[in-house]
Image: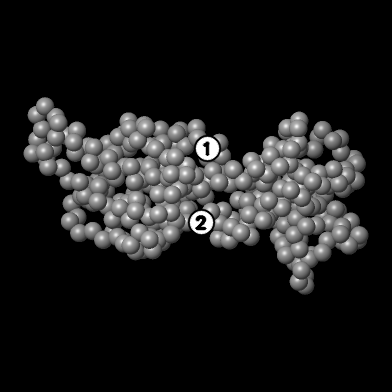
Amino acid sequence: MLNRRHLRIKALQNIFAWQMTEKKDSVSGQKALMQSIDSVYEMYVQMLALLVDVTEYTAIDAIERSNKYLPTAEDLSPNQKLLNNKFAVVLKQNPEFTAAVNKYQINWHSDPELVKSIFIKLKDTKEYEAYLADTEENLESSKEIIKFIFRKVLLKNLNIIQAFEDKFINWPVDSEVMKGMIAKTVKNFNSEDPFKNKLTPISADWAEDSRFVKDLFAYTVKNDQAYQELIAERTKNWESERIALMDTILMKMAICEMMNFPSIPVKVTINEYLELSKDYSTPKSNSFINGILDKILTDLKRTKSIKKIGRGLIED
């Protein structure tokens, strides 16, 4: 699921894109932000659908084997246990899953060779051989081969990675969220009644989190000039072109949070953006941003521009 760090990253990416456009349309920018978040959920559903299609390829493989010119006895009666994998069957019948597949118009069958290549690699593993040899299966045990296919087959397949990278521009970052969502789904599907299982939501509290990320984007771009002036006051000895654009955006977002989100402690805000600077800006950005924000915070406290709910939220 997306947590606040992931949401800040999404806002950062889209504020950067907004800054780089000539026509700075905040409405279109926020729409793009929400679409980029929805793409994480689509990636998750795409991967679930691919897992299902791999299990279903068992039937196609059985037909191809039986149609050989000289089929063996095993070709004529192959083990199709994976086709009836209990987790996959329950997932396919889950109304949330089917609705999401329809919403995103997911169809891995349009690239049958890709699914076939995955199945062929799977058939050559000792884990798959052991799975077929075990005649007993319940919902919990059915998950083990699904986890193996996901972790050791799909995520190790360069063609699969390329297919997802082509479709999802933020795959390097968003794939980590997707992996967690898949793991949580497999763990939480505990009923053989498909109506009693739930897909993993995009966040723990989407109503609250969607407000947070929308407001973070909206307030930052709305007050862009005002925040720029706050930063300029504390960077007079720096040539503007020497300050990385990403550093400026991170500082603006931090100022936005300090001034507009009364329930988030100032210390948490500053720490979050210092951490983001390590991954998204220059090696020296962390100390630079920390020093400038510390000075700006002093100014904001002096002018009583920061209002927090609860005791100690400014300093703690």
Q: Residue farthest to the top? A: 69
Mark found first going from the N terminus, 2 or 1: 1
Please state if 23 lies on the left or on the right of 154 as rendered.
Answer: right
Kindly identify the residue that appears in the image at 50 percent across and 32 percent down. Answer: 166
Residue 288 against residue 314 in the figure, above or below: above
Residue 120 placement (x, y as % from top left): 27, 36
Please state if 135 lies on the left or on the right of 304 as rendered.
Answer: left
Query: Are there few (<14), some (14-19), or many (20+) residues within 10 Å of tag 1?
Result: some
Residue 54 against residue 22 in the figure, above or below: below
Q: Nearer the viewer, mark 2 or mark 1?
A: 2
Q: Residue farthest to the bottom? A: 311
**Residue occupied by mark 2:** 201
* Amino acid type, mark 2: Pro
Element under disc 2: loop
Element under disc 1: loop
**Residue occupied by mark 1:** 168
Kindly identify the residue that appears in the image at 40 percent across and 33 percent down. Answer: 159
Kindly identify the residue that appears in the image at 74 percent across and 48 percent down. Answer: 218
Residue 196 placement (x, y as % from top left): 38, 63
Q: Quadrant of residue 59?
A: top left
Q: Residue 145 carries which label?
A: none
